[in-house]
DNA sequence: AACTCGGTCAACCGCTCCCGC
DNA sequence: TGCGGGAGCGGTTGACCGAGT
């Protein structure tokens, strides 16, 4: 048994892309749009795996990509979001228009980790490095217990995460709150992360270049299955509000009265 | 000039999720 | 309801490059 391979490995190129391959891919997507990655290589005359084409397009060729160094503000946003979401690079990327998950992941591993360590903060837990008494419950969305990774409830209804006022049942003491404030020190970004109910929508059923833009991804409802591993029963929308730029709910959530149940 | 080493980042791999049949 | 295939995601790899010796 076993899965069929995603492509005919014997006849596919690997490694760095050539300019000609890039151009073929760009031309093809310009005409036909994104999607059908499996069949795209053949249609575009590329000897590449579909996955490779997709990655090349998303991480390098997409016209809406922002190249260049990360700003200080972007750094802080990434740190904040990572403290909430853990290594959910695609979700973090969704909050940074023009940046890709791969780019952010690399940037995290090469720059931000060191930056946090130099601040005396553990990049995984976002707690002070010298802290001896490690609780298994720390930040609301620390990797070990945030709902996007190992903690996968069968079903969620509606979630509100307010970083500045975390209502974690395990984050109860003044001491812990104080530690949390210290670990945030100069980060005064207002980061309210809200997960609410949204009407069921098909996940990127008709992918287009616009539907994959970072901004549209933010507006796009994220199903709970995407977040929790496929066992939940209702789609969930992520409304992210922070930095004073996006205080409004998305259209889907505005249509829902079910909202704001404290979580974490 | 040659070599080593560490940092960076594009690309690959393997797994999971979701949808359609 | 179960299965297979397509797509997406996160972790890892390895080529490349510049700084240091």
Image: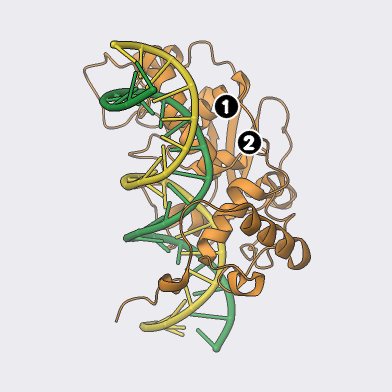
Chain colours: A orange, B green, C yellow
Residue at the (35%, 13%) spot, across then down: A175
Residue at the (37%, 38%) spot, across then down: A143
- Secondary element type, mark 2: loop
In the picture, measured across the screen, residue A119 lies left or right of residue A95, that is left
Residue closest to the eye, A183 or A2: A2
Quarter residue A122 falls in:
top left
In the picture, measured across the screen, residue A30 lies left or right of residue A198, that is right
What is the residue that sits farthest to the left in this orientation?
A: A132
Mark 2 = which residue? A96
Q: Is residue C12 above or below residue B12?
A: above
Q: Earlier in the sequence, mark 2 or mark 1?
A: 1
Q: Is residue B17 above or below residue A123?
A: below
Residue A262 visible in rendering: no
Task: Provide the chain ID for the residue under circle 1.
Answer: A
Mark 1 = which residue? A77
Q: Are marks 2 and 1 in contact (CB under 8 Å)?
A: yes
Q: Residues within 10 Å of mark 1 (few under 14, many from 20)?
A: many
Residue closest to the eye, A192 or A61: A61
Residue closest to the eye, A129 or A162: A129
Q: Quadrant of the C terminus of chain A?
A: top left
Residue at the (72%, 44%) spot, across then down: A64
The picture places residue C12, in percent across and down from the top left corner, at 31, 45
- Secondary element type, mark 1: helix
Q: Is residue A176 above or below residue A146?
A: above
The picture places residue B21, in percent across and down from the top left corner, at 55, 88
**Measured Cα–Cα span from mark 2 to mark 1:** 8 Å
């Amino acid at each position: 048994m076993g899965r069929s391979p995603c492509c005919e490995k014997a006849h596919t190129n690997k490694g760095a892309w050539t300019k000609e391959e890039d151009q073929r891919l760009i031309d093809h997507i310009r005409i036909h749009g994104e999607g059908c990655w499996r069949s795209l290589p053949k249609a575009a005359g590329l000897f590449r795996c579909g996955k490779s084409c997709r990655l090349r397009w998303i991480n390098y060729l997409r016209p809406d990509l922002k190249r260049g160094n990360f700003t200080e503000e972007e750094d802080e946003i990434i740190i904040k979001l990572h403290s909430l979401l853990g290594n959910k690079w695609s979700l973090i990327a969704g909050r940074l228009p023009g940046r890709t998950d791969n780019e952010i992941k690399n940037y995290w591993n090469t720059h931000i980790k060191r930056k946090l360590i130099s601040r005396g903060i553990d990049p995984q837990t976002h707690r002070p490095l010298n802290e001896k008494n490690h609780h298994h419950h720390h930040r609301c969305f620390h990797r070990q217990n945030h709902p996007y990774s190992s903690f996968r409830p069968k079903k969620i209804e509606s979630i509100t995460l307010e970083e500045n006022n975390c209502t974690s049942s395990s984050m109860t003491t003044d001491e812990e709150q104080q530690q949390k404030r210290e670990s945030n020190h100069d980060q005064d970004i207002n980061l309210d992360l809200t997960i609410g109910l949204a009407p069921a929508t098909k996940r990127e059923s008709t992918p287009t270049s616009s539907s994959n833009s970072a901004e549209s991804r933010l507006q796009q409802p994220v199903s709970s299955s995407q977040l929790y591993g496929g066992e939940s029963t209702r789609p969930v929308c992520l409304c992210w509000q922070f930095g004073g730029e996006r205080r409004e709910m998305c259209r889907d959530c505005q249509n829902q009265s079910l909202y704001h149940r404290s979580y974490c």
